[in-house]
Structures are given as structure tokens and as C-alpha cells.
Amino acid sequence: MSNTPRKPIPKVAYAPMLGLETYVRARVEKDASHLVQLRASALNQCVYCLAMHRRDARKDGWSKERVSQAENWIDNREQFTEKERAVLELTDAVTRINGESSVPDELWDHVEEQLGEKEARNVLMAIVAINAWNRIAITTRMDPRSLSRVDAFDLGNE
């Protein structure tokens, strides 16, 4: 992680992001949000967001093992329900997006089958939100040590 400071984003620019965040928090189950946030942040290697979301998931009762499993779910598939795997599969596809073939119709159909049409769309917005936050945090070099109540595990030092 570089310590090169970047100019912060003007606070007014965060307003649309916070609106999206409010929308997602009101419509996506907390456990699904944790899965999305942990997995996308791990894929994007966003140390700031990983620290924040590890801390938040553990605050909500997740074990360190569950947090680690979510970040590396492919090696831990059996630890997740079919619905959770659908959320994680969509998170992977959208986070790694590279053209229309990245999210095949079969995957979207499976996600809708598991979550329902409305929840699938809300989870998509959660994935979009965390990917945007990851890009802001990485680009502006946000320091995870600046977060309150993070420990060595949250910072990836355990």
C-alpha cells in the first residue's frame, strides 16, 4: 500500500454515492451485503474497504473464519447456501466485468431464481456501490489505519 497522499474527493461529490448506499442498506439483507462487500473488496484488493467490512461483519456476529471464507468463497463453497453462492457468483461476475459475456443470462436467471427479481436487482446495486467505493478508496489512497475500532485481523495483519 502506497502512502502517497491524494487530494480527497469534494464532499458534495459523495452525495450521490451516499444516496446509493442508503438505497442499498434499506433493501439488501445485512448478510448479503457483507458477502458482497467482502468479496468485491477482496477481488479489488481494496485494503481500506476490506478493513472496514471485516470490522463491520464481525460487529454483526460474523466469525473471523466466516469473513475469510466470504473473501475466498470459491475454496469454501460448501460453507454457503445456494442463495449465498448466487450472491457471491454475481459479485464475482460484476466485479470482474469485461463485456456482456461477463454476466451470462444463465447466471442472471439463476440469481433471480434464488433471490427473486426485486432482490436480485437490489443486490446488483449493492455490487455496483461497493465497486465504486473500492475505486475511490484505492485511487485516493485511503488509509485503513484511519478507521476506528479496526484490529490486526481487519487490517490483514493476522
Image (cartoon, rainbow, N blue to C red):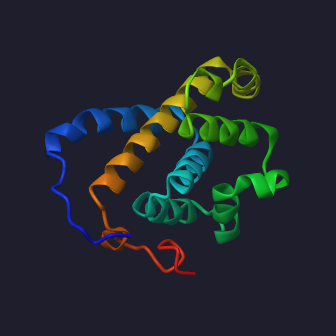
Q: Is residue 137 left or right of residue 38?
A: left
Height in image: 18 above or below 139?
Answer: above
Q: Quadrant of the C terminus?
A: bottom right
Query: Residue 106: where, in percent of width, then height?
Result: 76, 21
Q: Quadrant of the N terminus?
A: bottom left
Residue at the spot 63% in from the left edge and 41% down from the top edge: 92
Q: Is residue 12 left or right of residue 53?
A: left
Q: Is residue 123 left or right of residue 15?
A: right
When asked about the image quadrant of residue 13, the answer is top left
The front one of 23 and 143 is 143
The front one of 45 and 119 is 45
Residue at the spot 53% in from the left edge and 28% down from the top edge: 122
The front one of 31 and 139 is 139
Query: Residue 51: where, in percent of width, then height?
Result: 46, 65
The front one of 154 and 7 is 7
Query: Residue 141: where, in percent of width, then height?
Result: 30, 61
Residue at the spot 18% in from the left edge and 54% down from the top edge: 8
Residue at the spot 54% in from the left edge and 76% down from the top edge: 153
